Image (spheres, coloured by chain):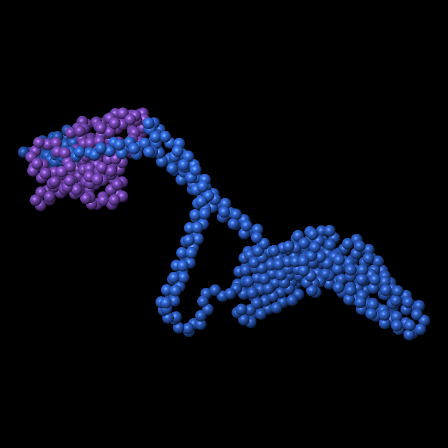
């Protein structure tokens, strides 16, 4: 897991402007998690590639205004989430997402047999696709990226109570969709 | 197992408990409930299953976008600047908009100003074209209207001649007892408004009004004349007879009220108004007549004295003939002088009233509905489209021209800014 520790958001003074070496370090740290989040959120590899680039550009421009330290991470994901929402709204894909089953390019880091991995991943991705977008984001942030509710609230710009409600509803939607897809097999 | 004492928590609370987000009193209550409730425990475990399934998703290898990001960031700004590279563009856009708006406002204002000062006579407003003011000041005159009355004005020269002529008249009148009483056409020294430099100016005006109600306008004009201290000398009223009847009036108002009366006439409710006024300087004319009168009166006095000295009746009769013709001429000249006096003291305004053309369709009620003519409709529509296209193209041309100027101003600024930006080494 990438960030499994629970954190409280800590307001801090803005960071100084970024030097190139600092950017490289930043880029290498956040490239993979941000991309996985974006990809699972939008479900399209090409779109995710573009959105990753957009997110990094925006993050660079906003970096002087972001908090330093651990409080920075939710804000990065906030930028990524808003970038995804904007792109999907433009493409009118909120209601429906094309889900490319491009498993060949995916790097699998588990020790399971390929058959099992394929079956599990396909079912989970289908079920995730059925979860509405605004519920999918908090679910991914919590389950995959280990955000606490407070950080999710910062990342999505909602209250903690709303986060609690949405995570619960997202799980319910996922369960229902997963059961259906499992029954269809 | 005993029944749980607390009510079942909702799924959201259970999920929050699973996520470690529940604290304090609620936490202890929840834990005691879960210890006693298998149903809630199963809900709890399903939350964990969902999270595990999602965590089991394979991680995807991200693309390397570093160079692209750096290139995009560099093209926008230098590294150490504050963010917001869009500000220069916003400023430029705001500047262009401001310049455009100012230009358009200038051009529109210039058009309006030019229109307001144009010497157009047929303006649909209450403005009247008065060149008389300048005429009066210059002492010149415009057109001579035939039959315009004249004004007798008190000037030092008049007064002297009038005074001189007065007693002579009386004397001659008293002396010419046998020749019959001569009516003294006196009142030569009547006071009357003089021009700025003692000149005699007769003012006339013509007002053409197109009014919704001719009859009402007719009465309003008459009332106006009386209110101004004048009177209506002529009137022609055809409005009562037919729906398209017109009317006209000739007013005489005191010269001092001429301008005010013209303004009030133009202010009557109307659809269209045309007003003209002219001034005639009759000073020279008047002086000529006065000189003529003096000469005639001198001749008359001579003839009277001649007749007294006449020896025979035949001589007296010949002088009487001559005297009669001189008297006739004197009458005529004095009449002209009187008329000129009147024309200066009383200005003449001719008002022509015309009805407004009927708006709306003038169709006989029993005419049958026109048939649907698609061919004509098509032709009309094509005509409209053609005109609309013309209008669009015209607007585009204007826009292009209007934009060309600010573009010429802005483009060098933009280019200079772009050239000034240096790439990050």
Residue in view at x 26 percent, y 32 percent = B67
Q: Is residue A98 visible?
A: yes
Residue A169 visible in the picture: no
In the rendered image, which quarter contains the C terminus of chain A? top left
Which quadrant of the view contains residue B49?
Answer: top left
Question: In percent of the image, x 31 and y 25: which residue is there?
Answer: A16
In front of the other: B222 or A107: A107
Residue A17 drawn above or below residue B130: above
Query: As rendered, which of B410 and A118 lies closer to the eye?
Result: B410
Q: Is residue B317 left or right of residue B191?
A: right
- The reply, left or right, for residue B217 in relation to residue A40 is right
Q: How many marks?
A: 0
Judge whether B340 appears above or below A154 on screen.
below
Query: Residue B290 location in percent, x, y?
Result: 79, 60
Colour seen for chain A: purple
Q: Is residue B54 above or below residue B373?
A: above
Q: What is the quadrant of the N terminus of chain A in the image?
A: top left
Q: Residue at x 60, y 61 (%)?
A: B207
């Amino acid at each position: 897991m990438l960030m499994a520790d629970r954190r409280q958001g800590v307001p801090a003074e803005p960071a100084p402007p970024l030097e190139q070496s600092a950017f490289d370090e930043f880029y290498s740290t956040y490239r993979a998690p941000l991309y996985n989040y974006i990809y699972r959120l939008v479900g399209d590899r090409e779109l995710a590639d573009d959105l990753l680039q957009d997110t990094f550009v925006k993050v660079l421009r906003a970096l002087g205004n972001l908090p330093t330290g651990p409080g920075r991470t939710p804000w990065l994901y906030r930028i990524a989430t808003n970038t995804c929402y904007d792109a999907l709204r433009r493409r009118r894909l909120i209601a429906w997402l094309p889900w490319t089953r491009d498993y060949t390019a995916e790097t699998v880091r588990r020790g399971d047999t390929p058959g099992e991995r394929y079956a599990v991943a396909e079912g989970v991705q289908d079920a995730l696709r059925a979860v509405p977008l605004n519920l999918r984001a908090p679910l991914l942030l919590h389950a995959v990226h280990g955000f606490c509710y407070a950080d999710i609230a910062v990342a999505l710009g909602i209250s903690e109570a709303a986060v609690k409600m949405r995570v619960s509803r997202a799980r319910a939607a996922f369960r229902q969709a997963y059961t259906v897809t499992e029954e269809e097999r | 197992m005993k029944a749980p004492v607390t009510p079942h928590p909702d799924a959201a609370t259970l999920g929050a408990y699973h996520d470690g987000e529940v604290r304090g009193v609620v936490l202890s209550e929840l834990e005691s409930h879960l210890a006693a409730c298998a149903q809630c425990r199963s809900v709890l475990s399903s939350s964990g299953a969902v999270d595990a399934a999602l965590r089991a998703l394979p991680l995807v290898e991200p693309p390397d976008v570093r160079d692209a990001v750096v290139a995009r960031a560099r093209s926008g700004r230098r590294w150490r600047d504050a963010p917001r590279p869009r500000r220069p563009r916003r400023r430029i856009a705001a500047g262009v908009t401001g310049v455009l708006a100012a230009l358009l406002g200038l051009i529109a204002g210039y058009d309006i100003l030019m229109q307001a000062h144009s010497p157009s006579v047929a303006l649909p407003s209450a403005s009247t074209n008065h060149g008389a003011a300048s005429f009066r000041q210059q002492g010149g005159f415009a057109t001579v209207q035939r039959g315009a009355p004249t004004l007798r004005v008190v000037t030092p020269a008049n007064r002297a001649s009038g005074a001189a002529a007065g007693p002579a008249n009386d004397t001659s009148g008293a002396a010419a007892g046998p020749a019959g009483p001569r009516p003294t056409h006196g009142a030569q020294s009547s006071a009357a408004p003089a021009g700025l430099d003692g000149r005699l100016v007769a003012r006339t005006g013509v007002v053409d009004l197109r009014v919704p109600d001719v009859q009402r306008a007719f009465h309003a004009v008459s009332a106006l004349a009386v209110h101004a201290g004048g009177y209506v000398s002529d009137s022609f009223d055809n409005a009562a007879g037919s729906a398209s009847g017109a009317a006209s009036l000739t007013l005489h108002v005191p010269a001092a009220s001429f301008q005010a009366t013209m303004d009030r006439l133009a202010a009557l409710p109307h659809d269209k108004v045309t007003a003209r006024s002219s001034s005639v300087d009759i000073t020279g004319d008047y002086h000529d007549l006065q000189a003529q009168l003096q000469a005639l009166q001198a001749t008359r006095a001579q003839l009277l004295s001649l007749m007294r000295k006449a020896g025979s009746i035949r001589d007296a009769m010949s002088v009487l003939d001559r005297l009669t013709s001189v008297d006739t001429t004197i009458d005529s000249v004095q009449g002209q002088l009187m008329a000129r006096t009147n024309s200066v003291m009383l200005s003449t305004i001719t008002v022509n009233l015309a009805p407004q053309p009927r708006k709306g369709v003038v169709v006989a009620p029993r005419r049958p509905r026109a048939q649907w003519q698609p061919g004509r409709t098509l032709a009309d529509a094509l005509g409209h489209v053609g005109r609309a296209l013309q209008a669009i193209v015209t607007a585009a041309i204007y826009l292009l021209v209007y934009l060309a100027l600010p573009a010429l101003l802005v483009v060098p600024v933009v280019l200079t800014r772009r050239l000034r930006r240096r790439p990050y080494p």
